[in-house]
Amino acid sequence: MPGVPTDGGAVGTVVPFSREPGDAVAAPPVRTIRHGVAPPVSRVYVSFSSGNLLQVACLGPPIPEGGGGRGAQEVAVGRVVEVNLGGGGSGPGGADVEEEIDEAEMRRIQYGSVPAFALLQSRKNALADAAAMSRVPSVSEHAEWWQYVLEYSKTIGSLLGNPDSLPAFMIDDPKTILKDREKPTSLKASWELLEIFFVDKQLKSWLPERFVDWLADYDSLLTKTENTVYRTLTNFQKKLINLQIVEDDPDYWNGLAAALSVGWLDIVVNMLRFHGSYQLDQMDNRETENGLVEAVAVLVSTMPRMRPDLPTGKLGHCCKTRPDFIKALEKWRGQVNKLECSAFWIQCGHQKTRDGLKNLLHIMLGNIKNLTAATSHWLELFASHFLYIRPFTVGFEGMNHLAQKCIQLKPSTDNSGLTGLLGGILSENPEVVLAECTKSFGPWMVTHAMELLTADNDYADMMLHEERPNIGGISLEELHRLVYAQVLCSHSLTWQIAPTYLSSCLNQGLGLLEILLLKQPIQDNRLVLKTLEICRLYELGNVSTNIMKIGGIYHWKHGRKGTGVYWFQQAHDKVRLDRIALQLFENIGKSVTDDSFKVVLSSFTGTEISRGPFSRHKKEGLVSLLGKQWNFSYS
């Protein structure tokens, strides 16, 4: 942590902290702040904000305003950022997300999610009206509601990226283990988890297999410091270039076992073909060894999978019904047992090949000892149970019990937000799910994920929509939307989409929306027109009128008389228009005939001017009102 110098230097100067050797105090955590201020940073101010947020103001060197002359005023350029002390991040994306998604990409996601959110809210309101008429207890009981939520989830998911997308014009390398693809993000991974377990009812019959697919896409995000199957294969990929005989390297067999344990069958078959017995100059001398390797590769590629279909390039034998799967599994395991007891192992002269292949067979037979040794993280062991030990696991209770067992076998000290989120899902605890989303993924995730939580969960629906006196009589759903709307309002590039979320908050949203619109600057006419359009969309006529009046006053005071009069006319501000008309009428005096000028003023103000005597004022008043080009003589 920083310390203060004691040599009489500048007060508040920050100096580096150096821990003395042998000091038992652990080194303080270092947090990177993206302030965006060009170096050098001359001053830093720190203050506590609400909750666990820390406000850090970074100021650059003062810049003279007005050309740098003697009388120029120095203006400090800087920025204020918020640091989340609980998770290490700030902004709408949360702690885990900010390291993966920059501000521009996050804004793209924010803008792209508005139409999907607005459409779902419109459908919810329509179903709520229909439910009130048909006396249905809740919107979630409508048969088509989960399909609407699923469509919403797919739309949001497409904004977050596609981990399976491949770069164009890519030539496959036969020695490549892991193919290049779009870098996965924690935001996308967490969204898919919620969709799998809370929304998509079509997955219930093959939910374990869908989780295996999810792990294949996001295994690299489970931990930053500990080993995973993805990291094991990545390290071996780097090592493979310099290997002459791959089967002599223990990492080759460790990588095969790790990939097979989590069901990456295409990778396993591809790696088995790296074996030296496939080389043309060795096939005659290692025929038995090559036959064993190929037999294992065939068994791996024909492994039964209880799912309707497989993605392109994935291996396995799909079984759509449980009886078909049981029948295929018994036949397949019989073939594995037959190969494991074969006499050809005696003729295999390569010890490491024999041991490595037998280890793969034991994994396919569901040997818990071999599965535990092959996996690195408890989630990987969790997925391996679905594949080889308990393929018929259903229900949150059974999955949670299995997860606790895997955590005991593979404890982890470096848990990401994904593991905490999955723990809350499996324990059927919406409070934990919301807390993990808030901590790791930020207000955007919480605001949009609440629709997934309540799609088919009555307890979550009641918890989120219950009005709570301790937070001002609003619900948790409204509270999280207000928090996210405040995040949007704090940035000049995102405040325009905040009304969509504020308008969905029935208790306090419209009041905050009025405050937001009234606080927009009125110097720029384009911004004023945008604000007025928002008022029109949300039927805020009084706010629109006040904005036009404020704009008229501003332009009038700054000498733009015509613009000021225009906004007063748009606001139908009869009082101010009458005052301007009378002032104009009195300044002109007798230079214009009474009747003709009153007709002009009537058309100007939209009201009839009463006939009566005119008072004479100074010529300067008229010039100030209409401009120097007007010059009237007084008789």
Image (tube, rainbow, N blue to C red):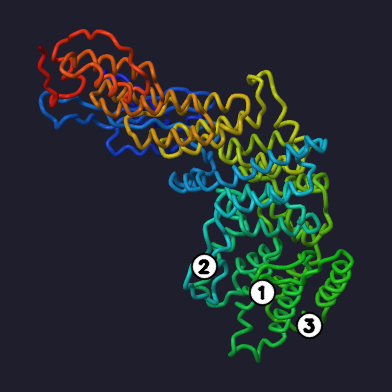
The quadrant in which the N terminus is found is top left
The CA span between labels 1 and 2 is 19 Å
Three-letter amino acid code at disc 1? Val
| Looking at the image, residue 483 lies above or below residue 457 | above
x 69%, y 35%: residue: 432
Cβ atoms under marks 1 and 2 closer than 8 Å? no
- Horizontal and vertical percent position of residue 309: 73, 68
- Horizontal and vertical percent position of residue 335: 83, 76
Disc 1 or 2, which lies upstream in sequence? Answer: 2
| Looking at the image, residue 588 lies above or below residue 516 | above
User: What kind of element bears circle 1?
Assistant: helix
The CA span between labels 1 and 3 is 21 Å
Select label 2 or label 3 by which is in front. 2
Question: Tag on residue 344?
Answer: 3
Rendering quarter of residue 606: top left
Question: Tag on residue 239?
Answer: 2
